[in-house]
Image (cartoon, rainbow, N blue to C red):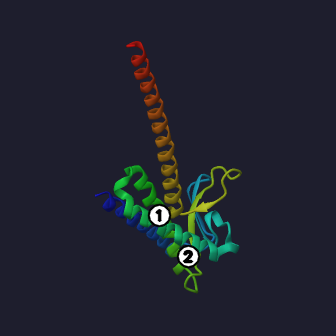
């Protein structure tokens, strides 16, 4: 059952990203900006030939290979081990895979030459221009939310494991005290 949920999350993530990008491309020109909330949130159509937030464009080949390996690795892990871990972890990994696939579709097909495409970015959160200046897309959002859930999951697990070990140590100490008091 979990694998069906994770697969649906991946497909929904890819579809939301793909459809939103096609709407932007069909209705806007590169560089055009439409304010949704003036000076807070705009739809600004740009392209990105690099990695996250336009970085590493000079390492495009390496980044595409590393991204492909990461997407496949996480995807296979999700399929093979989905019964072994928490639903939160599965959702996080599915969002990361879906977002990665969404941007990879652009990198492969959104250009003049197959495999030399650019990513469509359009979500422009411009409320704090000195703090945040990047324009992104839904795929980026899903990867970041998935990564946040992933971090949340592991912090929660560490806290749970720490408390269990602390409780076990206290229980062992209590047993030891009981054994000594019976002597």
User: Residue at point 58% right, 74% down?
Assistant: 64
Q: Residue furthest left?
A: 1
> Counting other residues with Cα less than 10 Å from the Cα at mark 1, is it few (<14), some (14-19), or many (20 or more)?
some
**CA separation in Å, label 1 and label 2:** 19 Å
Q: Position of residue 54 (x, y in %)?
A: 65, 67
Front in this rendered view, residue 142 or 154: 154
Q: Specify the quadrant that holds the N terminus.
A: bottom left
Q: Position of residue 166 (x, y in %)?
A: 48, 30
Q: Nearer the viewer, mark 1 or mark 2?
A: 1
Q: Report helix, strand or loop for mark 2.
A: helix
Q: Position of residue 44 (x, y in %)?
A: 59, 65
Mark 1 touching mark 2, by CB under 8 A? no
Is residue 29 among what the camera can see? no
Is residue 168 among what the camera can see? yes
User: Residue at point 37% right, 58% down?
Assistant: 82
User: Residue at point 45% right, 58% down?
Assistant: 93
Question: Taking 91 as reference, is 176 above or below it?
Answer: above
- Mark 2 or mark 1, which is nearer the start of the sequence? 1
Question: Taking 165 as reference, is 61 above or below it?
Answer: below
Q: Position of residue 5 (x, y in %)?
A: 33, 59
> Counting other residues with Cα less than 10 Å from the Cα at mark 2, is it few (<14), some (14-19), or many (20 or more)?
many
Front in this rendered view, residue 94 or 169: 169
Q: Specify the quadrant that holds the C terminus.
A: top left
Q: Report helix, strand or loop for mark 1.
A: helix
The numbered mark at residue 74 is 1
Front in this rendered view, residue 96 or 142: 96
Image quadrant where residue 123 sits: bottom right
The numbered mark at residue 150 is none
According to the picture, the residue beneath numbered tag 2 turns out to be: 107
Image quadrant where residue 179 sits: top left
User: Residue at point 41% right, 50% down?
Assistant: 88
């Amino acid at each position: 059952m979990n694998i069906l949920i994770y697969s649906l999350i991946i497909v929904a993530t890819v579809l939301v990203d793909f459809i939103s990008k096609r709407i932007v491309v069909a209705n806007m020109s590169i560089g055009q900006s439409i304010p949704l909330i003036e000076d807070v949130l705009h739809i600004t159509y740009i392209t990105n030939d690099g990695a996250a937030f336009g970085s590493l464009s000079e390492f495009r080949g390496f980044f595409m290979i590393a991204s492909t390996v990461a997407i496949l690795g996480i995807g296979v892990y999700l399929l093979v081990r989905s019964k072994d871990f928490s639903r939160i972890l599965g959702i996080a990994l599915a969002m990361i895979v879906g977002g990665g696939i969404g941007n990879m579709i652009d990198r492969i097909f959104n250009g003049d030459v197959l495999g030399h495409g650019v990513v469509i970015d359009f979500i422009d959160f411009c409320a704090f221009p000195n703090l945040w200046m990047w324009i992104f897309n839904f795929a980026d959002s899903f990867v970041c939310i998935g990564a946040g859930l992933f971090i949340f999951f592991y912090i929660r697990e560490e806290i749970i494991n720490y408390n269990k070990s602390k409780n076990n140590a206290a229980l062992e100490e209590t047993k030891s005290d009981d054994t000594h008091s019976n002597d």
